[in-house]
Image (cartoon, rainbow, N blue to C red):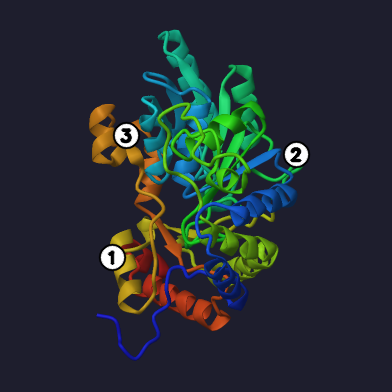
Amino acid sequence: MTNQNIESIPFARPSLGQEEEEAVLKVLRSGWLTTGKEAQAFEDEFIRYTGAAHALAVNSATAGLHLILEALGVKEGDKVLTSSYTFTATAEVIRYCGGDPVFVDLAPGSMNMDPKDCEKKIKKLLDEGQNVKGILPVHIAGNPEGLEELFALSRRYGLFLVEDAAHCFPVPSKKGMIGTWTDAGVYSFYANKTITTGEGGMIVFQDPQLKERISAMRLHGIDKSVWDRYTSLKAPWEYDVIAPGFKYNLNDIAATIGRVQLRKAKELLNKRKALVQAYRTRLKDADFLDLPTWKEDHAWHLFIISLRLDKLNIDRNQFMNILRDRGIGTSVHYKPLHMMTYYRERYKLKEEDLPLATGLYHRVISLPLFPDMTMDQLERVCQVILETGESHRSKAEMESVK
């Protein structure tokens, strides 16, 4: 049980202040709460900030991924290659369209999908006469490692590449901000993300022909937005439905929070980076841990450590339970999708089919990381981790120390 006298340190906490409160109050007092001028302004400011060709705000990254795959024509039986090492949303949006995810294992030493395994599976699918449509990589923890190789692969085989960039904002690269120079990228503004609107997301994409389709499909397939109908001099009830669309629009209350958060994005990222550097310094001598490699071009949405289980007499879950009982919030990112009942049974998958993803899952722990985390809190997290590791060394490790 947690000691009630010890402050609990949450796994994540949004960094919100008076500016966000005042922005929300302004919207509430305006009388217009749904998608309107705040959402439009958020999109425009996002384009200027990122250099994206086009940006459309949605009520979740899941919605954004669904919309872009639908607009790119994913349909029944199409194959889309993606990582198994991700949240279920990445694969489920492929199923929404009737397509099938084809899971790619991790690159050695990475948490992102392996370009070599990806190409191997593309070739096999094509040899079987399958309709391979695209590649959907995931930037775990905010690290875009392997993206250039996967993008080159997509061009080689005539496939689209859509980035699940839910963790990866804002990250620069030589070609531009991650998410903006492939076919499309989708960011998440969920409560624990690098900037937040509570719930929300943004699609960025290159092809102007996609804009009309996505804009309509995010709001019931109607050819005009609510705000356009409201502000138009023409009869607002005169609109057309071009397809059975979805209810994926971002409201102005969320959008106005996003506008404030966007102005703070660099500051919030720098705070995360300072915490990551402190974690790495404090834990660098713990021989029972593998730490993430420092990278400047990384969003650091998560700080994920890996246990060296051969040096411990407890497993990952037991280690996490000790941290929980001492008031430390943690999480696991992720249990691979090929181990989940739906995907395992539908596609007849086994754990050994993706051995690197399976093996990593049993060792990883995501530590508390949020912009307003104090160095005192970080020190306590590190102290508990170090004490836990030292007090639970394996018998072989104890013998080697002697």
Q: Which amino acid does the dot numbered 3 rest on?
A: Glu
Amino acid type, callout 1: Gln
Residue lying furthest right: 174
Residue 65 disc label: none
Q: Is residue 297 visible?
A: no
Q: Is residue 187 left or right of residue 243?
A: right
Earlier along the polypeptide chain: callout 3 or callout 1? Answer: 1
Front in this rendered view, residue 182 or 20: 20
Q: Name which residue lies at 25% across and 36% down.
A: 342
Q: Is residue 172 left or right of residue 127?
A: right
Q: CA distance from mark 3 to mark 2?
A: 36 Å
Numbered badge on residue 318: 1
Q: Secondary structure at mark 2?
A: loop
Determine whether 17 is above or below 267 in the image.
below
- Mark identifier at residue 175: 2
The Cα atoms of the two marked residues, 3 and 1, are separated by 24 Å
